[in-house]
Image (tube, helix red, strand yellow):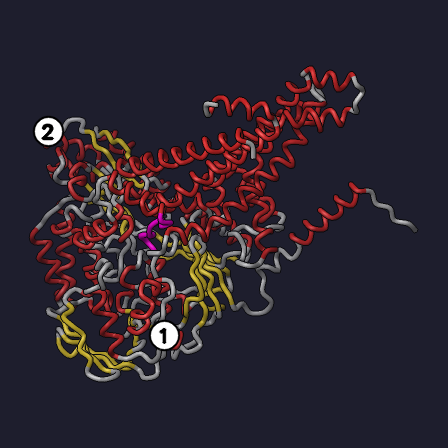
Amino acid sequence: MTLSLNRRQLLAGTAAAGLASVLEGRRDAFAQAGPRTTINVRIDRELGVLDPIDRKGPWDGNIIRCVHQRLVKQKPNSAELENDAAAEIKQTSPTVVEFTLKPGQMFTDGFGEMTAEDVKFSFERIVTPPPGKPATYKGDWVNLEQVEVTGKYTGRIVLSAPRANLFDIAIGDVSGCILSKKAVEQRGDAIARQPVGSGPFRVENVEPQRGATLKRNPDYKGPAPRFEQINIRYVSDPRTTELALRSGELDFAILPPSIAESLRSVQGLTITQEPSIAYLWIGMNVEKGPLSDVRVRRAIRLGLDVDQMLVAGYNGKAPRLNTLLPPQIFGHWSDAPVYRRNVAEARKLLQEAGASNPRFKLLVLNQPAQQNMALVAQALLREVGITIDIDAQEGGTYWSAGKGDTGKNLDLFLLRFNGKHDPNFIMQWFLSSQIGNWNWQRWSNPEYDKLFTQSAGELDRDKRRDQVIRAQRLMDESAAYVWLTNESNFIVHRSWLRPTGVPGWIDWQYEGFAST
Amino acid sequence: MSGETARYLASRLVTTVLIVFGAMVLLFALSAIVPGDPAASLLGPQVEPDAARQFIQEMGFDRPVHERLWHFLANVLTGELGTDVVSRRPVAELIASVIPYTIVLTFAAILLAVVTGVPLGVYAATHRGSALDNVLAFVSVAFIAVPSFVVAIFLLLIFSIWLDWLPVLGAGAVGDWADQAKRLILPTVALSLGWVGFIARLVRSSMLEVMGENYIRTARAYGLPQAMITYKYALKNACIPTIAILGLGIGRLLGGAVLVEIVFSRPGLGRLIYDAILVRNYPVVQGAVLVVVVLFVLVNLVVDLSYSAIDPRIRRDVSRAGLPR
């Protein structure tokens, strides 16, 4: 038998063979034989700075918390705290916390053992950062006077005044991460990309626009993480994330409800719905024109149908919120009024206020959920006699719209903030001192400010709860807020993967991710 | 290099500097007009007003635009593109880390578009009015009309999800060429498809025009083979407008493949600029735009030189128009 090939056949054959070799083993690139040792996790924002002092958001914080130890940390899937780097920690007075470190906790890259000096350095640098670094998270360590080092492993955290959320916001959170003093001094700014910690993972690399790779830290003294490696992949587009979950390139992601729902039928994927602690509301500028009249604000509140808006924004898959604090936060006002739409009453209020056919601008982020809700609000308020012009802006413009004197021009706005498991953290943005910064309502109430200060330093839980609920009542009376939802997280993951996170799912616990 | 070419090159280099300067002036002016507080976007919600003010001062965002522009240009002359205000990394380092992906994707897309579009255009011109010519006309317009990100999503659905042949995400592991090649296929096709249609239409119309020229008729009269007439004499001249368009195309893709980069989650210059604009990270925007503008101008310079090399008449015309003899 003879085989003859002409030039054209040879070229075609070579091309086909090349393509086949490229396509070959498509699955092999992602599949791993036996139990998985590596997982791929999606984040929707680019990593910024892996240094507690200058972190840009929860996506940074989640890595920082699994690379460093804290004196205490949250238990898996819980907001409850347990000892981490501390062998013992106790509040000996309202303003003093004493701690003893476990001996032998080693920093990676040969930076030695963790001592109380490292604790002092880490906490105090948040309050007094080195030159050139803004004190972005100074508020986390408010009232910190100093950390006294009393021995190699022992120290005292001394406050200038009592503080109720010291453990939740400072000691047990990102600002409580313990860095190696020596490493920070030696690496300088590079510590933000090559962090040195003693936690369950270490950062193998950080690549712009790609994400980061975490590797298990063999020297970690606590329980070893289940996975050897976690690839944190920055994928901004939720549709691409959906496809990557379908194709097996991602193992874990949190997605908007509409996209997550479309994955329900995909074999091998599990979708879990968890209430969030991010909260969304329509705010009103109480200094602006007709909105300065509480009757107009109440008319708007009665003219809206929150449930309808949530159907438009979240396919009805988000819980309704009736007060500032979501149910899972200490101090939630469970008896808060649930306002139902009442067009007649709303019109009456407008008439009483002498506001005939008022026209307002509603600022929203140019994001589908917010825009859909704004459209529904526009239609609902039209029936009341209020004209709404929707002003959809991209992030950069939107997030500075309420700042400084520019904020005086706002009318209505849809706003969403991330929360933490502490009422005072959530309440702080509505203080009088935040006008021109994050209090876009420009609502000022001395009693609210006082209740905030009192509750922040109140160590008696019952008293603190009463103060926090009273503060929420004042917000309700102002009618400057139409609470919408504390959202739901739709966690999509491989069925064999058991992700862990602090309830609310803003804080993920990579070290606890395991296979079932 | 002839004196004519040298003069032409010199005039283009002067133009290049002016274009880059003009683009940067425009960019700085726009950054002054566009609303948005970099401190709010970059430092997060907890930032204290004092810290925000300090940040704005340190970054020089409170200075007048002309001062910032002067400072930026002075730094550029010393090879310094500034510092990313988010990661505190040098902007040049950030650009260097993503630019190879952009260049590879751009040239792969253009190459694929040329390799496919030119033969289709030639075929359509040489078989004018045939059924295939009509089909190609329809398909080409369809390719041009459909945005590349829509093509990208369809390609992903077909080749990654349905057939399960190619991956969805990223640009591949660093150093793993096979992985990188695999992940380049779909973005390349998505980007090039519109250009395939465009080039096919352009080549067809240019070829039809050239085929009616006297020298082609003369070649036919001399009895030269049709293939030689088509490919050696007609196509060479018909390609000049295509080459000009390709220059623009490469320039556009260098900074403008944003949507495809987002859909495939690939690193790239376009995405770097897009992400930086969203958070008002001006040093990155300025540095990356400068690089895109310089590349754009340089690519077009090379293209201009190449077609003036193909057709000496163009060189003479430009030389006359450009510099006095």
Callout 2: SS: loop
Q: Is residue A465 above or below residue B26?
A: below
Which residue does the numbered mark 2 point to in the structure image?
A: A354
Residue appearing at x 7%, y 52% in the figure: A446
Mark closer to the chain start, 2 or 1: 1
Q: Amino acid at mark 2?
A: Gly
Q: Is residue B247 above or below residue A119?
A: above
Distance from label 2 to label 1 (Cα)? 64 Å
Marks 2 and 1: which is nearer the front?
1
Tell me where residue B30 sits by quadrant: top left
Residue appearing at x 27%, y 46% in the figure: B38
Q: Chain of mark 1?
A: A
**Can residue A332 be seen at all in this image of the molecule?**
yes
Residue appearing at x 68%, y 23% in the figure: B125
Q: Is residue B69 above or below residue A417?
A: above
Bounds of the magenta segment: B78-87
Residue A198: numbered disc: 1
**Can residue A253 be seen at all in this image of the molecule?**
no
Report the front residue among A359 and A15: A15
Q: Magenta stretch: dominant SS?
A: loop
Asked if the stretch drawn in magenta spans residue B301, the answer is no
Asked if the stretch drawn in magenta spans residue B80, the answer is yes
Q: Tag 1: Cα neighbours inside 10 Å, few (<14), some, or many (≥20)?
A: many
Q: Position of residue B262 (x, y in %)?
A: 46, 45
Number of numbered discs visible in the structure rendering: 2
Callout 1: SS: loop
Q: Position of residue A438 (x, y in %)?
A: 20, 49
Report the front residue among B7 and A26: B7
Q: Is residue A12 left or right of residue A418?
A: right
Q: Position of residue A188 (x, y in %)?
A: 31, 65
Q: Is residue A292 above or below residue A174?
A: above
